[in-house]
Image: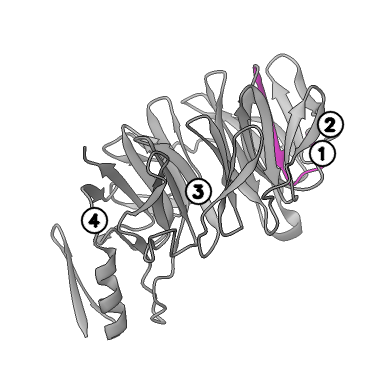
């Protein structure tokens, strides 16, 4: 069976097995929404994404136009490559003291090097290096916190977490954390950390403490990120549910049928993307869905899929999210978003 897809002046004929075409009909959304492509001439995974100084920055890039680059910048109309002096793949981004800071990973295998860089809208400057990957950046009380797989940050011995300031330089954070850090967030004026350890950790004074209760814990996998949604802390990661912390207990929200790689709040909804293909009450979510606390329901967004030469059905994933100019941007590995051709990046607008 052949399926003809038309987007603007682009026509593509695809040959798929009948089951694939039949299942594709489930992607039709049940509420008013708009999926759109995001510019042209860019290639990459668009992971991570971060909004800085009125522009959307995306890492994991291969090229913009004919120029090879590790990072791309979208101003709402066109893509550019702000990669002066930037080497290596971008692993994390955050704004600190009016500059965009980024962790970078250069090389392959045992020869990899890891740096922290800052961008002042003109050039990238070297800030420091670590002996492991930088996975998360977060600002609290005038200092930039850096989490990752390192045990040394610049010249400071630091177990998986360190902090940096323009005036004090590099310092360790307590006695460090038990394993690789993947997520950092400030919640109710306290720093929370998640990663390849069973309990979420919280910085209390100069010491780290486990955030535990007698209910649900991170029993399998580990935390990849946090979102503050209506003053409740949500944790997501390589487990098939979400965890919600209300300062007293962890409560499971789910289940999904696989892990979550990205979450953000947009238009009062909590949006989640990842490897999952189903969510509570949504059997055909296909890697992206959203939750509303008021109704406690999940909704279909049309899904994202990736067509492959070996005819694997619905492969693909969502790896990053960002809200830019009141539109939700998603990045990852996919070729269709909500039924529209979109190569690894798309934007979604909820029509009120």
Q: Which residue is mark 4?
A: 30
Q: Residue furthest top?
A: 167
Q: In the picture provided, is 297 more to the left or to the right than 320? A: left
Name the residue located 61 percent from the left edge and 57 percent from the top edge: 238
Distance of label 1 from label 4 (alpha carbons): 50 Å
Q: Are marks 2 and 1 in contact (CB under 8 Å)?
A: yes
Marks 1 and 3, the one that precedes in the sequence: 1
**Of the residues under marks 2 and 4, which one precedes in the sequence?**
4
Q: Secondary structure at mark 3?
A: strand
Provide the residue span drawn in magenta.
Answer: 142-153
- Residue 4 in the image: x percent, y percent? 17, 73
Q: Mark 3: give few (<14), some (14-19) or many (20+) Cα within 10 Å.
A: many
Residue visible at 14% across and 57% down? Answer: 8
Task: Looking at the image, tell me whether mark 3 or mark 4 is earlier in sequence order.
Answer: 4
Q: Nearer the viewer, mark 1 or mark 4?
A: 4
Q: How many marks?
A: 4
Query: Residue at left 43%, top 70%?
Result: 315
Observer able to see residue 58:
no
Determine crowd level at label 1: few under 14, some 14-19, many 20+ residues with C-alpha closer than 10 A.
some
Q: Which residue is mark 3?
A: 262
Residue 151 part of the magenta-drawn span: yes
Does 262 lie within the magenta span? no
Relative to residue 238, is residue 307 drawn left or right? left
Residue 340 in which image quadrant? bottom left
Residues packed near mark 2 inside 10 Å, few (<14), some (14 to 19) or many (20 plus): some
Q: Which residue is rendered at x = 48% and y = 62% of the image?
A: 276
Provide residue 155's location: percent of width, then percent of height: 83, 31
**Residue indicated by mark 2:** 156
**SS at badge 2:** strand
Q: Main secondary structure of the magenta part?
A: strand
Tell me the mark number nearer the camera, choosing from 2 and 4: 4
**What SS does tag 4 mark?**
loop
């Amino acid at each position: 069976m052949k399926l003809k897809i038309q987007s603007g002046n682009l026509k593509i004929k695809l040959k798929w097995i009948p089951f694939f075409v039949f299942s594709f009909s489930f992607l039709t959304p049940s509420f008013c929404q708009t999926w759109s492509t995001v510019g042209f001439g860019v290639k990459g995974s668009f992971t991570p994404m971060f909004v800085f100084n009125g522009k959307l920055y995306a890492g994991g890039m291969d090229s913009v136009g004919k120029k090879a680059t590790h990072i791309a910048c979208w101003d709402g109309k066109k893509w550019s490559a702000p990669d002066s002096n930037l080497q290596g793949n971008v692993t994390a981004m955050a704004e600190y003291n009016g500059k965009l800071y980024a962790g970078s990973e250069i090389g392959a295998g045992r020869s990899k090097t890891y740096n922290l860089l800052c961008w002042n809208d003109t050039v990238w400057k070297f800030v420091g290096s670590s002996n492991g990957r930088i996975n998360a950046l977060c600002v609290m009380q005038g200092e930039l916190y850096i989490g990752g797989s390192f045990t040394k940050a610049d010249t400071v011995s630091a177990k998986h977490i360190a902090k940096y300031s323009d005036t004090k330089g590099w310092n360790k954070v307590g006695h460090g954390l038990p394993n690789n850090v993947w997520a950092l967030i400030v919640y109710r004026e306290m720093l929370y950390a998640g990663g390849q350890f069973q309990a979420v950790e919280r910085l209390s004074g100069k010491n780290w403490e486990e955030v535990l209760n007698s209910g649900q814990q991170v029993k399998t996998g580990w935390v990849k990120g946090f979102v503050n949604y209506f003053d409740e802390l949500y944790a997501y990661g390589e487990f098939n549910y979400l965890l919600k912390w209300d300062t007293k207990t962890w409560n499971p929200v789910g289940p999904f049928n696989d892990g979550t790689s990205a979450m953000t709040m947009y238009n009062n909804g909590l949006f989640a993307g990842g490897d999952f293909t189903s969510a509570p009450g949504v059997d055909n979510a296909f890697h992206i869905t959203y939750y509303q606390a008021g109704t406690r329901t999940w909704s279909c967004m049309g899904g994202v899929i990736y067509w492959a030469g070996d005819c694997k059905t619905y492969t693909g994933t969502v790896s990053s999210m960002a809200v830019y100019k009141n539109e939700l941007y998603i990045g990852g590995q996919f070729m269709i978003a909500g039924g529209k051709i979109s190569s690894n990046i798309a934007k979604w607008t909820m029509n009120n």
